[in-house]
Amino acid sequence: MNESYLAKEWSVLQNQYDSYEKFSLVIKLFSIGLISFSYFLHHMGLLTLLLLLVLWLQDAIWKTFQSRINLRILEVERGLAENSGDGGPGIKAFQYNRDYAFTRPGFFGLIREYLKHAFRPTIAYPHALLVGLMVLYFLN
């Protein structure tokens, strides 16, 4: 295995991983902006709540994609660590989509994966807090 191919793949995947993190933060900031805007315009309604829930699920889907990249990064890093340059068996570079195609869950598996990510603390915050604030607003 040519170690430089794995290093190139690692670099691309790591940049993508970081990019997903940035856009997840954008989704969270947009959610905060949405509820703030709705509150100050006195338009806190069911539509705002539904939009917050959609943004929460979108963030979970986004982070699910990121977690798939992370799995491949870990595999590439294992290959880089094990590769002694002697041409022995190892991980093949540039197999991200092929590997995922063999392990991709079905419809319900994808839904379960998205929901599992939605309730991870780093994703649920601030979404759960914003939805809670909306519920408190409706109760008052």
Image: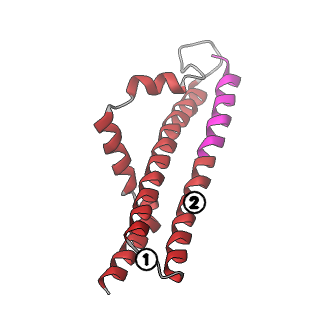
Residue at figure coordinates x 49%, y 21% from the top left? 98
Q: Give the magenta-colored segment's residue range.
A: 1-17
Query: Residue at the spot x=56%, y=71% of the render?
Result: 33
Q: Quadrant of residue 52?
A: bottom left
Quadrant of the image containing the N terminus: top right
Q: Quadrant of residue 123?
A: bottom left
Q: Position of residue 13 (x, y in %)?
A: 61, 36
Q: Is residue 83 left or right of residue 114?
A: right
Q: Position of residue 32 (x, y in %)?
A: 53, 70
Q: How many marks?
A: 2
Work out whether 31 lies above or below 73: below
Residue nearest the observer in this picture, 52 or 110:
52
Mark 1 is surrounded, within 10 Å at the Cα level, by few (under 14), some (14 to 19) or many (20 or more) other residues, namely some
Write the residue at 63% across / 34% down: 10
Q: Nearer the viewer, residue 136 or 103?
A: 136
Q: Name the residue nearer the viewer: 29 or 9.
A: 29
Left or right? Give the position of 92 relative to 12: left
How far apart are the alpha carbons under marks 2 and 1?
23 Å
Element marked by disc 1? loop
Residue type indicated by callout 2: Leu
Label at residue 44: 1
- Mark 2 vs 1, N-terminal side: 2
Expressed as whole percent of the image width and height from the top left, the position of residue 96 reads 53, 27
The image quarter containing residue 85 is top right
Report the disc number at residue 25. Answer: 2
Q: Residues within 10 Å of mark 2 (few under 14, many from 20)?
A: few
Magenta region includes residue 5: yes
In the rendered image, residue 127, in percent from the top left (x then y), is placed at 43, 65
Q: Secondary structure at mark 2?
A: helix
Extreme residue in the bottom direction = 140
Is label 2 in contact with label 1 (beta carbons under 8 Å)?
no
